[in-house]
Structures are given as C-alpha cells and as structure tokens.
Amino acid sequence: MADATRTDGNAFGRAKSLGRNAFGRASEEPYQRRPADGVVLVLGTLVFVLAAFHSGDPGSLERSIQQLVNELPASLDGVFTACLRLGALWAIGLVVVAALFARRWRLGPVAALLARRHPLE
C-alpha cells in the first residue's frame, strides 16, 4: 500500500511530504531523547578528543597543502574573499528556502536575520 503522507504519485507530492518532516517538530513541547542520541554524543566526543590530540602534529599532506597555499600570490586574496562571501550567501539562501519549503515560517526569516547580523568581514 502507498505511503499515507503522499498525496499522489508524482514528484511534487513526494517532495511536499518530505518538506513537512525535514526540520523536525515545530511544536514547543520539550524534546524526548532517544538512545541513539547518547551514542552520537559519545562518538562525537571521541572524535573531538582524537582530533585535539592530533592538532599539534600536522602530517605530510597537511604540510604540503599549507606550503601550496602560502606560495599563492597575494593578488588572489580578493578572489578568494569574493568566493567565500558568495558561498556563504548561497548557503544562507539554501537554508532559508528549505525552511520556507518545509513550512517553517518563523525559521526562514530568523535564519536570514541572524546571517545578516554576522556578515563575513
């Protein structure tokens, strides 16, 4: 039997049903934690600790990348800054559009306003 959340068999109906659940619940009720949340917390902490121990010891690949970036001419700084700002603007736009598509009417404008408060300089 077909999924009850889909309105019809076309792609728009599937995307519409996906959009409702894309950002989780919109209610103001307290969240209930799942056992998987604890596993994610432990694994995330482990990865963080391992990365912290490795932070002071760059490998040969990291040294090669640093040398390559340091040898770039200073005249390219403006190009890289423009790419960084355009990429950030694109990401903000995607979050706002996804929030509005998921009918999270308060999340879209709030994300746009928060991004405006913290411009890349």
Image: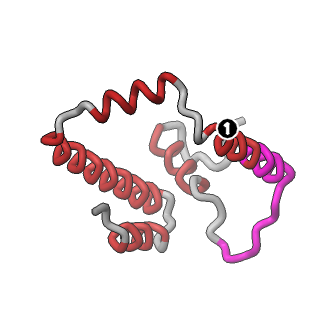
Please, which colouring scheme is shown?
secondary structure
Q: Is residue 94 left or right of residue 11?
A: left
Q: Position of residue 41 (x, y in %)?
A: 77, 51
| Nearer to the camera, 26 or 114 | 114
Q: Is residue 63 left or right of residue 45?
A: left
Q: Quadrant of residue 80?
A: top left
Residue 53 x/y as whole percent: 68, 41
Q: Residue furthest right?
A: 35
Indicate left or right for 62 with 94 as reference. right
Disc 1 marks a residue whose amino acid type is Ala
Residue that lies at the very extreme toward the bottom in this rendered image: 28
Residue 85 in percent (x, y) is at: 27, 53
Chain part drawn in magenta: 27-44
Q: Which quarter of the figure is the N terminus placed in?
A: top right
Q: Tell me the residue at 34%/53% (across/down).
A: 88
- Quadrant showing the C terminus: bottom left
Q: Is residue 89 magenta?
A: no
Q: Please tell me whether residue 31 belongs to the stretch shown in magenta.
A: yes
Front residue (pair 15, 29): 29
Q: Which residue is mark 1?
A: 2
Name the residue at 13% across, 41% down: 75
Q: Residues within 10 Å of mark 1 (few under 14, many from 20)?
A: few
